[in-house]
């Protein structure tokens, strides 16, 4: 199992987590996460902005 997020989840011990890999670099940016702020009304726009971030990161490689 992989974790895809830039921030380690609260309450989960790294020692006890059963993960194959922590893929930080493909998680949403800090700015995008803060803008979204778990507001479900923003979810559609969040998805589009996140896709743009992923595409932008792929183009930079």
Image (cartoon, grey):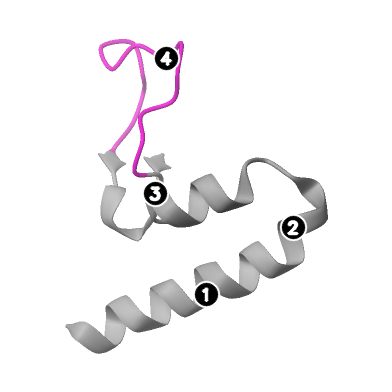
Name the residue that disc number 3 marks. 30
Q: Is residue 16 magenta?
A: yes
Res 42 label: 2
At a point 56% along the width and 72% down the height, the residue shown is 49
* Quarter occupied by residue 7: top left
Which quarter of the rendering shows the N terminus? top left
Nearest to viewer (mark 1 / mark 4) = 1
At a point 29% along the width and 37% down the height, the residue shown is 20
Helix, strand or loop at disc 4? loop
Nearest to viewer (mark 1 / mark 3) = 3
2 or 4: tag closer to the N-terminus: 4
3 or 4: tag closer to the N-terminus: 4
1 or 2: tag closer to the N-terminus: 2
Res 12 label: 4
1 or 4: tag closer to the N-terminus: 4
Judge the density around disc 4: few (<14), some (14-19), many (≥20) Cα neighbours within 10 Å: few
| Residue 45 drawn at (x, y percent) | 69, 69
Tell me whether circle 2 and circle 3 mark residues in contact (CB < 8 Å): no
Distance between mark 2 and mark 4 Cα atoms? 27 Å
Of 42 and 21, which appears nearest the observer? 42
* Quarter occupied by residue 5: top left
Which stretch appears magenta? 6-20
Res 51 label: 1
Helix, strand or loop at disc 2? helix
List the single residue furthest toward the bottom: 59
At a point 62% along the width and 42% down the height, the residue shown is 37
Res 15 label: none
Nearest to viewer (mark 2 / mark 4) = 2
Q: Is residue 47 above or below residue 41?
A: below
Distance between mark 2 and mark 3 Cα atoms? 16 Å
Distance between mark 1 and mark 3 Cα atoms? 15 Å
Of 3 and 53, which appears nearest the observer? 53
């Amino acid at each position: 199992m992989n974790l895809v997020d830039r921030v380690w989840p609260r309450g989960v011990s790294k020692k006890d987590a059963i993960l194959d890999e922590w893929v930080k670099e493909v998680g949403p940016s800090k700015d995008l996460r803060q803008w979204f702020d778990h507001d479900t009304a923003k979810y559609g726009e969040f998805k589009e902005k996140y896709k743009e971030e992923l595409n932008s990161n792929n183009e930079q490689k």
